[in-house]
Image (cartoon, helix red, strand yellow):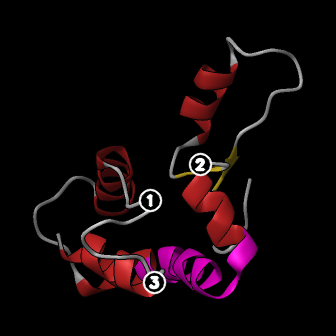
Amino acid sequence: NKLQRAFLRATRQDLLKPLRALSPYDLRFMHQRWFGARHRVTERQFDAFWNWFGKYVRIMRYDKNVMGMWESGLIYGLIDRADVNELLRTQHIGACLLRFSERHPGLFA
């Protein structure tokens, strides 16, 4: 997958043994959310996606603390609000999940 390789290179991870690559869930989330699960992607769709995702990749590349949180799993990453609510429903009061904001590129929710 070209996106996976680009992500690993941009975040300076080993291509053969990455600490945390994009998961199948992450890739499905992006495919559904940004491209409507279509097989062909328009330039406009890709530009909108990269405007959003590229900001997170840049943050992870240059901020060691954020990258460390990503690699250790402290940042969940790619999940929509409805799925977050479902996951947290069975957790203790006060539990939280750190994810990439869908609406505000480069910010966390």
Residue 65 lies, in percent from the top left, at 74, 71
**Residue 104 in view in this figure:** no
Name above or below for residue 86 compared with residue 25: above
Answer whether residue 60 is magenta in the image: yes
91 left or right, relative to 52: right
Residue 41 lies, in percent from the top left, at 19, 73
**Residue 67 in view in this figure:** yes
Write down the residue under mark 2: 73
Answer whether residue 102 is magenta in the image: no
Write down the residue under mark 1: 20
Specify which label sits upstream in the sequence, 2 or 3: 3
Quarter of the figure with residue 96: top right
What span is in magenta? Answer: 50-65
Q: Local crowd at mark 3 within 10 Å, few (<14), some, or many (≥20)?
A: some
Q: Residue visible at 72% across and 60% down?
A: 108
Disc 2 on helix, strand or loop? loop
Q: Local crowd at mark 2 within 10 Å, few (<14), some, or many (≥20)?
A: few
Circles 2, 1 touching at the beta carbon (< 8 Å): yes
Q: Local crowd at mark 1 within 10 Å, few (<14), some, or many (≥20)?
A: some
Circles 2, 3 touching at the beta carbon (< 8 Å): no
At label 3, which amino acid type do we have?
Arg
Camera-nearest residue between 109 and 8: 8
Specify which label sits upstream in the sequence, 1 or 3: 3
At label 1, which amino acid type do we have?
Arg
Distance Cα–Cα, label 2 vs label 3: 17 Å
Specify which label sits upstream in the sequence, 2 or 1: 1
Write down the residue under mark 3: 12
Circles 1, 3 touching at the beta carbon (< 8 Å): no
Residue 4 lies, in percent from the top left, at 28, 70
Name above or below for residue 91 compared with residue 36: above
Disc 3 on helix, strand or loop? loop
